[in-house]
Image (cartoon, rainbow, N blue to C red):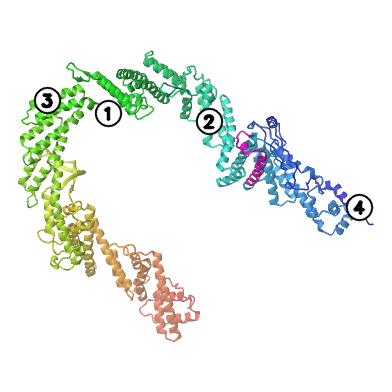
């Protein structure tokens, strides 16, 4: 039977469709075009806000989630997109429904309704005639019919396999959306259900991920399109991510791609100005998108770097927002939710159902930082404080009255004082303290923060009361005690802490007293003395009242009241707002007005006036310098006139105590009347005394005052209140040259002041009235003029001694003749320093000049404890020992060669070095004197103790080095006599025991290091005897061959081999000499393993050589020579129990052994012979040979 082709196709197609249910497939609409290809007509509509509210109040969705609390944060709905996604205003589920519906209009035209059939469509590649024939063949297998139906449909409709697969693939995204809608996001099987769609639709993994991210983006955009943010939406996104099994990277990609589309759709219908308006619904939608993205990334556990990258991508899509801008908008989106949570916590506070942990979880869910959340806690606490005071939660700033200004007669603007509101009725309700304490605990606020919020809220109310009460106290309508009781009561009503109230009381007091001072200032500005004085007196009284009110609280902070309230350096104090010139002027007016005249018409300051002046000084913050200026201006002329008259009379000479007492009484009375202190009197009297002293000195013979002059000066000092210090200071200025001249005359030609001149110098010092310190300074200056040339002479001699003619000429720039030098040669001597041309006499003369003129000064640098024995008080008693603390002194040198500039530091060190060398080499009568003067000479030069020790050590090092090198070279070691010589050197050069020991050790080390160099520098190997002697010498001095002498580990191994090798080879060292070997190894500092390696190397090398020789002699028939080598081989075998590691041929080994066994063993017992045979057999590897 033959069929028409069209009829055949129809039959096959009908068979396939009718049998579809047999495979368990359900029809799926597959749109003919992808989303990117579809382009429905755009529509633009705006929803009324009511639409948002009504949609948000809908009941449960197909996702199984109930509607949660929402926050209406928009005033108008955003416009819908003109893309094929056409995001709905209802949220994510609605967006998915619309997304899936966009495929419905084209799904009916799809030729394949079941995606699983695509798996069987592979047969479409077979020849059509074959497939048609197979399909027409009767069969019970529906699969075959299905294949036939597909192929027939393909043939009839002209559709190939690739077109079918593409048709199926396009339907996969819609299938994902429908699967999510059907099962719901919270279904336990939704993730597996979505994943099965990839297999059902035959989609590659990469393509399937792209489809899932696209579906996620559709849901996210739909959710963000509705500006009403719900807390449940964060969980929805998390469930959606889990259902789609998106990784962090895939999630970021979904958010980034959706952000581009979302912003493109929004910006089509919203201008930049609208998007910049925080209240515009489109701007709110964008902020919501940012918030949901931030939460998704954070909850996904992104690293900080990854989070920054993802948020930056979204910010870039949103018109180039920075990460910081994105996070700021996220924070502003989250704040209203957390604020609602705080309001809820406050409303449920009494139920006990809220705690800090609940708020902490809410904060974490919304992603608010600790700082932002804490600030919101403080604001919420402040709201509750106002509520408990019976006030609205917030203070409407728009209701605040603006400051008003009026223009005075001079055209200046002045602030209009507003009437203070009556706030006396505002106070905390009953139970407020307990409620606020509970809220503070829930909000995790510290006591300081809670007190601060209460204080900032109630400060105004408390200040209104306190200011009024303080003004009443100043007006004397309330007693200080009553005023304080009202202030304290108001404090308790408003929960105000003492610390806060102290600051406020200070401010109120400053305000009250500052207002009074401002009014008084107006009188002072116009020169109204009477009104200024009255105003300041009223201010003093008001100040005392305020002080009494404050001291009722028992606060020590107000003990120094004036310093706290009237701080001139603080512009906010009661007087700090006035400039210094204004304050000084007010005090000057008060001062001049307060001075009264006595019965005789003389000026006088009474006790009462003085007390008020001191109070006004504190109130106005006037410094003592200004007070002194006022006193000098007012009383100075009278005081100076009286002092001048008295000074001129006494200076005439022949002054008596009666005359001095008369004038002194007049001056004392003036001081009492004017309330002057000694400093004020001395200000005028000191110049008068100085002038009188200069006049006396000018008339004195030789510049030395006579006895009458000295008496006159004493009387003037008494009259004018000149203390001894100032009198001596002036005398030093006047008579310094006189005293210096006397010192130089006393020096004479010798340069040393003779004993008979010392007392006259002391008498002169007393007559001149100079202090000990000043005289000492003058004395040192005079000696310095003599000292410097002596040092310069020694310096020149030292240069001439150590430098050649050419060197000195080059240094000084002068051509010297040969006769200038004692020798034309350079310096020479035993220690490398010149000793020709001895300058020790000149140095000792300088030392005598310094010491005999008492230039060395002793200075106490500390104390030390010493034991002191006290004899018995009576016969038969016991002697006692007590501990006494005594001062410790050190010598100081007021003038030195270096400080005077007479010598360079290099030459100073050279001079000291020369002195040490001379003192060391001197054997004559001056040796002891030189020895005792070393420290003094170094101090005169200006060298420090450390530098002197360094120079001494350098010289000592040279001496030690030369002597020890010579002795060890001749004797090999130092004996007792050598040690005594070195001890003498140590004492002479001032070298400590530790330094001497160190020098000796360094020298010995150096000598032995040189010997070691000789050992290894020779072409021949050192003998064992030489190595032993060197090793024992080092050991006897306690020197380590490696660390001290510097011999490397490799060379130590060589020394060990050189010393024991010949002994082993000769048989002098055998296996029984283990102690000797260990001793040598230990003394060389080698480890046991290192010694064993050396011995094994020696034995192994020598054994192989002996074996080769023995074998050669056996082959040549020279048995005697072979036996000699084998006997030596046995010696080496004894060290290792025969295990020499040799492997000769068995035949050769047997021949050698038989030769050895047949040899003469005369002198050896049978046991020894047998032992040697066993060792040789073991060494030759033939233990079984007999």
Q: In terms of sequence position, does the residue under pointer 3 or pointer 1 come before the other?
A: 1
Give the labeled residue for mark 3. Answer: 663
**Residue 694 in the image: x percent, y percent?**
12, 37
- Which mark, by number, is residue 377? 2
* Residue 26 makes an appearance in the image: no
Number of residues whose C-alpha sits closer than 10 Å to that of mark 2, classed few (under 14), some (14–19) or many (20 or more):
many
Q: Is mark 4 on a helix, strand or loop?
A: helix
Q: Is mark 3 on a helix, strand or loop?
A: helix
**Residue 976 in the image: x percent, y percent?**
19, 63
Q: Is mark 2 on a helix, strand or loop?
A: helix
Tag 4–tag 3 contact (CB < 8 Å): no
Residue found at x 86% / y 47%: 18
- 428 left or right of 1005? right
Between 504 and 1141, the one lying in front of the other is 504
* 254 inside magenta stretch: yes
Give the distance between the C-alpha atoms of the residues marked 4 and 3, in whole angstroms.
156 Å
Give the distance between the C-alpha atoms of the residues marked 1 and 2, in whole angstroms.
54 Å
Q: Residue placed farthest to the top in the image? A: 477
Give the distance between the C-alpha atoms of the residues marked 3 and 2, in whole angstroms.
80 Å
- Which mark, by number, is residue 7? 4
What is the magenta range? Answer: 251-280
């Amino acid at each position: 039977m033959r069929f028409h082709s069209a009829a055949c196709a129809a039959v096959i197609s009908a068979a396939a469709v009718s049998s579809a249910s047999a495979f368990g497939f359900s029809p799926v609409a597959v749109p003919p075009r992808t989303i990117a290809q579809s382009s429905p007509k755009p529509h633009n509509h705006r929803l009324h806000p009511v639409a948002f509210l009504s949609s948000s109040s809908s009941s449960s969705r197909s996702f199984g989630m109930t509607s949660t609390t929402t926050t209406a944060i928009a005033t108008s709905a955003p416009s819908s997109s003109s893309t094929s996604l056409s995001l709905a205003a209802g949220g994510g589920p609605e967006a998915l429904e619309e997304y899936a519906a966009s495929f419905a209009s084209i799904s009916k035209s799809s030729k394949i309704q079941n995606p699983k059939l695509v798996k069987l469509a592979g047969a479409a590649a077979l020849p059509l005639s074959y497939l048609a024939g197979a399909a027409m063949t009767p069969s019970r297998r529906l699969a075959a019919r299905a294949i036939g139906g597909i192929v027939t449909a393909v043939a009839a409709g002209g559709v190939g396999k690739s077109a079918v697969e593409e048709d199926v693939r396009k339907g996969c995204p819609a299938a994902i959306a429908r699967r999510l809608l059907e099962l719901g996001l919270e279904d336990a099987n939704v993730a597996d259900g979505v994943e099965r769609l990839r297999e059902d639709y035959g989609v590659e993994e990469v393509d399937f991920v792209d489809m899932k991210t696209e579906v996620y983006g559709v849901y996210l955009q739909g959710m963000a399109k509705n500006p009403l943010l719900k807390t449940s939406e964060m969980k929805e996104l998390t469930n959606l991510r889990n259902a789609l099994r998106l990784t962090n990277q895939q999630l970021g990609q979904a958010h980034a791609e959706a952000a581009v589309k979302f912003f493109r759709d929004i910006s089509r219908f919203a201008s930049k100005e609208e998007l910049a308006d925080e209240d515009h619904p489109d701007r709110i939608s964008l902020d919501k998108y940012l918030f949901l993205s931030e939460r998704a990334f954070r909850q996904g556990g992104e690293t900080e770097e990854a989070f920054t990258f993802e948020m930056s991508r979204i910010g870039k899509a949103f018109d180039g927002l920075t990460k910081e801008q994105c996070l700021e908008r996220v924070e502003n989106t989250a704040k209203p939710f957390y604020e609602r949570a705080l309001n809820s916590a406050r409303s449920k506070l009494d139920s006990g159902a809220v705690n800090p942990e609940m708020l902490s979880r809410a904060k974490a869910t919304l992603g608010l930082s600790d700082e932002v959340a804490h600030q919101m806690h403080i604001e919420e606490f402040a709201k509750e404080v106002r509520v408990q005071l019976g006030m609205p939660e917030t203070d409407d700033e728009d209701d605040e009255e603006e400051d008003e200004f009026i223009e005075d007669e001079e055209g200046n603007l002045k602030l209009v004082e507003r009437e203070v509101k009556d706030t006396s009725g505002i106070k905390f309700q009953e139970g407020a303290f307990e409620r606020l304490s509970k809220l503070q605990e829930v909000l995790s606020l510290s006591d300081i923060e809670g007190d601060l919020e209460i204080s900032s809220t109630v400060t105004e109310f408390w200040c209104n009361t306190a200011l009024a009460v303080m003004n009443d106290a100043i007006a004397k309508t309330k007693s200080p005690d009553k005023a304080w009781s009202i202030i304290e009561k108001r404090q308790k009503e408003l929960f105000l802490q003492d610390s806060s109230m102290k600051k406020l009381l200070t401010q109120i007091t400053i305000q009250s007293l500052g207002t009074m001072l401002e009014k008084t200032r107006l009188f002072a500005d116009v020169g109204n003395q009477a009104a200024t004085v009255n105003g300041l007196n009223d201010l003093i009284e008001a100040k005392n009242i305020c002080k009494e009110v404050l001291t009722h609280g028992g606060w020590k902070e107000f003990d120094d009241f004036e310093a706290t309230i009237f701080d001139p350096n603080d512009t906010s104090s009661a007087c700090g707002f006035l400039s210094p010139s204004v304050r000084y002027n007010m005090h000057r007016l008060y001062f001049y007005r307060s001075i009264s005249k006595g019965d005789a018409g003389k000026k006088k300051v009474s006790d009462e006036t003085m007390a008020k002046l001191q109070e006004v000084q504190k109130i106005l913050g006037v410094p003592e310098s200004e007070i002194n200026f006022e006193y000098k201006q007012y009383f100075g002329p009278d005081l100076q006139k009286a002092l001048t008259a008295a000074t001129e009379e006494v200076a005439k000479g022949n002054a008596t105590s009666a005359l001095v007492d008369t004038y002194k009484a007049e001056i004392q009375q003036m001081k009492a009347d004017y309330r002057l202190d000694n400093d004020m009197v001395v200000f005028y009297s000191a110049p008068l005394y100085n002038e009188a002293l200069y006049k006396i000195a000018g008339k004195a013979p030789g510049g030395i005052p006579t006895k009458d002059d000295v008496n006159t000066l004493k009387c003037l000092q008494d009259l004018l209140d000149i203390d001894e210090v100032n009198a001596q200071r002036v005398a030093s200025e006047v008579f310094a040259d006189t005293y210096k001249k006397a010192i130089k005359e006393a020096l004479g030609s010798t340069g040393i002041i003779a004993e008979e001149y010392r007392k006259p110098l002391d008498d002169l010092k007393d007559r001149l009235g100079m202090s000990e310190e000043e005289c000492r300074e003058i004395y040192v200056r005079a000696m310095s003029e003599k000292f410097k040339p002596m040092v310069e002479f020694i310096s020149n001699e030292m240069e001439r001694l150590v430098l050649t003619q050419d060197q000195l000429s080059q240094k000084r720039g002068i051509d010297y003749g040969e006769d200038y030098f004692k020798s034309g040669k350079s310096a020479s001597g035993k220690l490398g320093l010149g000793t020709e041309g001895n300058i020790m006499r000149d140095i000792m003369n300088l030392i005598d000049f310094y010491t005999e003129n008492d230039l060395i000064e002793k200075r106490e640098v500390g104390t030390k404890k010493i034991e002191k024995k006290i004899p018995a008080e009576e016969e038969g008693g016991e002697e006692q020992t007590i501990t006494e603390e005594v001062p410790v002194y050190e010598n100081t040198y007021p003038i030195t060669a270096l400080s005077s500039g007479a010598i360079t530091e290099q030459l100073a060190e050279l001079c000291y070095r020369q002195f040490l060398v001379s003192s060391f080499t001197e054997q004559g009568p001056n040796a002891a004197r030189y020895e005792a003067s070393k420290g003094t000479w170094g101090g005169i030069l200006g060298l420090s103790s450390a530098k002197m020790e360094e120079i001494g050590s350098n010289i000592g090092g040279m001496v030690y080095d030369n002597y020890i090198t010579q002795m060890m070279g001749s004797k090999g070691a130092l004996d007792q006599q050598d040690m005594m010589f070195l001890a003498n050197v140590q004492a002479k050069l001032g070298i400590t025991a530790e330094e001497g020991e160190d020098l000796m050790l360094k020298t010995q080390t150096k000598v032995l290091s040189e010997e070691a160099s000789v050992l290894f520098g020779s072409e021949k190997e050192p003998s064992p005897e030489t190595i032993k002697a060197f090793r024992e010498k080092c050991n006897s001095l306690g020197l380590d061959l490696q660390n001290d002498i510097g011999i490397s580990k490799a060379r130590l191994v060589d020394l060990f081999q050189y010393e024991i090798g010949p002994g082993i080879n000769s048989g002098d060292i055998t296996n029984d000499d283990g102690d000797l070997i260990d001793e040598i190894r230990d003394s060389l500092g080698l480890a046991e393993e290192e010694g064993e390696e050396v011995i094994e190397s020696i034995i192994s090398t020598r054994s192989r050589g002996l074996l080769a020789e023995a074998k050669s002699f056996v082959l040549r028939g020279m048995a005697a020579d072979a036996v000699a080598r084998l006997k030596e081989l046995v010696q080496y075998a004894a060290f290792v129990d025969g295990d020499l590691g040799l492997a000769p041929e068995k035949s050769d080994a047997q021949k050698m052994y038989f030769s050895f066994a047949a040899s003469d063993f005369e002198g050896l017992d049978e046991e020894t012979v047998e032992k040697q045979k066993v060792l040789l057999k073991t060494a030759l590897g033939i233990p079984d040979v007999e």
